[in-house]
Image (spheres, rainbow, N blue to C red):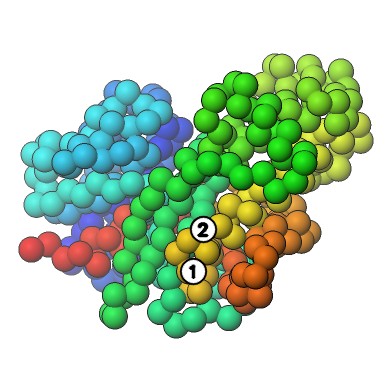
């Protein structure tokens, strides 16, 4: 039996798993999550993980949050440099692959089951049609898949940095508000965890609703205001109308982003939402504002209304994609 090592490497946590060719990527032989900031390198975590499990692997694939150049990656939110050749040397691997984490998520899409997904729009997928992936999290990631005649192949993009296009007067105000702070305003400044805070500050500054003292204190003491704003909106917390308005705008803009991506790659195979935010706000996405914005594309509205739109609820799609990559791309 052959064993493979897969990992999802992020600024907050590192998720490692060993799987076999017999059981496949959906049934790891062993897996564990490590707090990334507690370790000096990925190699340190891998060494501990393999020692604890008593397992070894000859091939490995890691999904990393950062750009990869010539087999090396400098992680965006960690002081780590990960190198494929160094991993092979230290752990006796015949092959070590690095891939962008969003590319890994996109790679997982063809292998997801119905239970791994939450449907926002049933639609009718076109066999072999392109697939779009939109992932609002800390930032905004976008990727897509195309059919090559035998299987889907995933491709990354930097579409999250495309220019923000306001859809109404209040969003024009948001654009002007952010231009004074950032100059260029991309969708990532708005459709992300960072974006939720930016929208909230704009609505507060423009006196859209009052910020109660208890909410101001709670936000001031928090390292990240996004979970507080999101929670208050989902729970309809009394006095937190500013949070509700923030998330209403956020969901609407996310729908526009997903609709734009669907048009760009002609995603008749479906649009999949991933990242840290969508699975946590399903009740807000279900209300209809998302799909209203998704289909609000003039003459393309009818086309978009027939595209399946789903939220990936599988807990570790990047890990799954990294594991399947080793199967999809056999060692030469």
Q: Residue at x 25, y 36 (%)?
A: 73
The answer to which image quadrant residue 68 occupies is: top left
As drawn, is 163 to the left or to the right of 235? left
Q: Nearer the viewer, residue 127 or 75?
A: 127
SS label for mark 2: helix
Q: Left or right of 249: which side holds 37?
A: left
Determine the image quadrant of residue 117. bottom right
Give me the disc on residue 267.
Answer: 1
In this view of the protein, which residue sits in the foreground, 23 or 128? Answer: 128
Q: Position of residue 51 (x, y in %)?
A: 23, 40
> Total number of numbered labels?
2
128 in relation to 57, above or below: below
CA gap between label 2 and label 1 equals: 8 Å
Q: Classify residue 276 by image quadrant.
A: top right
Residue 122 appears in the rendering = no
The dot on residue 65 is: none
Q: Which mark is residue 261?
A: 2
Disc 2: CA contacts within 10 A as few (<14), some (14-19) or many (>=20): many
Q: Is residue 327 above or below residue 98?
A: below
Point 59% across, 67% down: residue: 309
Taking the spot 48% from the left edge, 69% from the top edge, the residue there is: 266
């Amino acid at each position: 039996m052959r064993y493979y090592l897969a990992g999802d490497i992020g600024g907050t946590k590192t998720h490692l798993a060993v799987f076999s060719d017999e059981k496949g990527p959906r049934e790891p032989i062993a897996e564990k999550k490590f707090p990334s900031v507690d370790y000096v390198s990925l190699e340190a975590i891998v060494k501990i993980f393999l020692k604890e499990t008593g397992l070894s692997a000859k091939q490995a694939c890691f999904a990393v949050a950062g750009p990869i150049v010539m087999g090396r990656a400098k992680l965006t939110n960690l002081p780590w440099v990960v190198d494929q050749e160094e991993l092979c040397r230290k752990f006796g691997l015949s092959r070590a692959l690095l891939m962008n984490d969003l590319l890994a998520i996109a790679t997982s899409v063809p292998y997801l089951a119905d239970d791994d997904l939450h449907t926002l729009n049933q639609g009718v997928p076109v066999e072999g049609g392109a697939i779009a992936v939109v992932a609002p999290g800390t930032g905004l990631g976008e990727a897509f898949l195309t059919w090559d005649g035998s299987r889907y192949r995933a491709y990354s993009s930097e579409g999250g940095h495309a220019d923000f296009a306001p859809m109404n007067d209040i969003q024009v105000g948001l654009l002007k508000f952010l231009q004074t702070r950032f100059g260029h305003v991309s969708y990532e400044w708005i459709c992300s965890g960072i974006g939720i805070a930016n929208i909230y500050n704009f609505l507060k500054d423009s006196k859209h609703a009052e910020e109660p003292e208890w909410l101001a204190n709670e936000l001031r003491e928090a390292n990240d205001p996004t979970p507080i704003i999101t929670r208050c909106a989902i729970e309809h917390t009394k006095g937190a109308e500013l949070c509700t308005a923030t998330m209403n705008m956020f969901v609407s803009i996310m729908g526009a982003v997903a609709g734009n991506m669907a048009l760009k790659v002609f995603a008749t195979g479906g649009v999949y939402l991933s990242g840290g935010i969508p699975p946590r706000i399903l009740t807000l996405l279900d209300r209809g504002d998302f799909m209203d914005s998704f289909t609000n594309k003039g003459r393309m509205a009818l086309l978009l209304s027939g595209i399946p739109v789903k939220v990936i609820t599988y807990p570790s799609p990047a890990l799954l994609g990294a594991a399947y990559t080793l199967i999809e791309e056999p060692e030469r």
